[in-house]
Image (cartoon, rainbow, N blue to C red):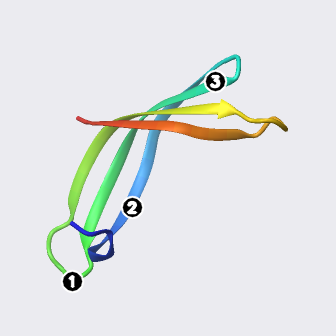
Amino acid sequence: MPSESFRSHQRVLDPKIMIRGDWAFEIANVDSTFSPLGGGEARCVVTATIVAMRKQPGATWKVARVVGLVD
């Protein structure tokens, strides 16, 4: 489904963050709802998501990887 054909709404549920040196990991469930712009039934999906971030010079964080597993 092309991204222009629906509206999405996401909500992060109970995120946990772990920091190990220059790496940070966020583990959470993400509740996503996709509603067709032309009308029709919305679809809901829950994914278990892991986001890996690496600390950059200047102490900012940059997303390195995102992994989502459909529940």
- Callouts 2 and 3 close, C-beta under 8 Å: no
| Disc on the earlier residue, 1 or 3 | 3
The answer to whether residue 32 is above or below residue 24 is below
* Callout 2 amino acid: His
Residue 38 numbered tag: 1
- Residue 56 appears at what percent x and percent y? 74, 35
Q: Choose between 1 and 45: the one closer to the eye.
A: 1
Real-space CA distance between mark 2 and mark 3, rounded to the nearest whole angstrom: 28 Å
Residue labelled with disc 3 = 23
Furthest toward the right, the residue is: 58
- Residue 42 point in image, percent of width and height: 20, 65
Q: Residue furthest bottom?
A: 38
Sequence-wise, which precedes: disc 2 or disc 3?
Answer: 2
Q: Residue at x 21, y 83 (%)?
A: 38
- 2 or 3: mark nearer the eye: 3
Q: Looking at the rendering, which quadrant does residue 68 occupy? A: top left
Please give the count of numbered marks on the rendered protein.
3
Quadrant holding the C terminus: top left
Mark 1, other Cα within 10 Å: few <14 / some 14–19 / many ≥20: few
Q: Secondary structure at mark 3?
A: strand
Residue at the outermost top position: 20
| Residue 43 x, y percent position in the rendering | 20, 59
Residue 63, quarter of picture: top right
Mark 2 near mark 1, Cβ–Cβ under 8 Å?
Answer: no
Q: Which residue is mark 2?
A: 9
Cβ–Cβ below 8 Å for labels 1 and 3?
A: no
Q: Residue at x 23, y 54 (%)?
A: 44
Q: Could you tell me which quadrant the N terminus lies in?
A: bottom left
Tell me which amino acid carries mark 1.
Gly
Residue 7 locus on image (x, y percent): 34, 71
Which is more N-terminal, label 1 or label 2?
2
